[in-house]
């Protein structure tokens, strides 16, 4: 039996990050967590590119461009969608989730989902660095692990 596992150690890993500017007070904390996670695990700052998009809905297009560029070993998608008083939240959450999943399935690199979708601001804050940890940091570690898992399986 073969068991494949990806290590959370960076060796020449290049990362693209797509961050949504809408709800930037949350997204900037997610980005800070992702950058912290990457740097703590030896990803060189020069091997990280960050692209800011207007909102979460625009994330999949730029994630696709990054994933298809051949420049990156993984793409991390970061954003925050917080429920308001209309159904707009449901549409954005559904389409962003589907869009990122489609990019992931149609590319040969990991595309990490770091878009927090919450009922209120308090929940978003919790997921951006307080009680629930930092989902950006979690995505960074997941990206490194997935890159190494793919490399291990390709041997």
Image: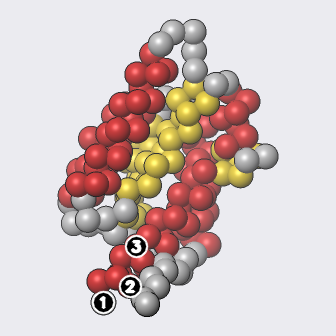
Q: Which mark is residue 155?
A: 1
Find residue 71 and report its horizontal and vertical position in percent. 26, 66
Q: Is residue 152 left or right of residue 128?
A: left
Q: Is residue 130 above or below residue 57?
A: below
Find residue 119 and report its horizontal and vertical position in percent. 64, 25
Q: Residue at x 36, y 76 (%)?
A: 150
Secondary structure type for disc 3: helix
Q: Is residue 25 above or below residue 109?
A: above
Q: Report if residue 66 is visible in the image.
A: no
- Which residue is situated farthest in the right direction here? 131
Along the line of sight, which residue is nearer the eye, 121 or 31?
121
Return the residue at label 3. 147
Secondary structure type for disc 2: helix
Q: Is residue 82 left or right of residue 19?
A: right
Return the residue at label 2. 152
- Which residue is situated farthest in the top direction here? 85
Find residue 10 and report its horizontal and vertical position in percent. 49, 79
Closest to the camera, between mark 3 and mark 2, is: 2
| Sequence-wise first label, 3 or 2 | 3
Secondary structure type for disc 1: loop
Closest to the camera, between mark 1 and mark 3, is: 1
Find residue 47 and report its horizontal and vertical position in percent. 40, 70
Q: Residue at x 38, y 56 (%)?
A: 111
Q: Residue at x 79, y 46 (%)?
A: 131
Query: Mark 2 Cα within 10 Å, few/some/many (few <14, many 20+)?
Result: few
Q: Is residue 115 above or below residue 144?
A: above
Quadrant in which the N terminus is drawn: bottom left
Q: Report if residue 81 is visible in the image.
A: yes
Q: Mark 1 and 2 residues: CB-CB less than 8 Å, in contact?
A: yes
CA distance separating discs 1 and 3: 13 Å
């Amino acid at each position: 039996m073969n068991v494949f596992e990806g290590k959370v150690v960076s060796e020449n890993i290049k990362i693209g990050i797509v961050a949504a500017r809408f709800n930037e007070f949350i997204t900037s904390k997610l980005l800070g967590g992702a950058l912290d996670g990457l740097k703590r695990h030896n990803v060189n700052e020069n091997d990280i590119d960050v692209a800011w998009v207007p909102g979460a809905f625009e994330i999949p297009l730029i994630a696709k461009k990054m994933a298809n560029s051949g420049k990156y070993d993984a793409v991390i998608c970061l954003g925050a969608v917080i429920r308001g008083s209309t159904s707009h939240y449901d549409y954005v959450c559904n389409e962003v989730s589907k869009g990122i999943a489609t990019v992931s399935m149609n590319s040969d690199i990991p595309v990490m989902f770091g878009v927090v979708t919450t009922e209120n601001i308090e929940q978003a804050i919790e997921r951006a660095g307080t009680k629930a940890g930092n989902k950006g940091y979690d995505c960074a570690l997941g990206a490194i692990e997935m890159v190494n898992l793919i490399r291990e399986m390709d041997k």
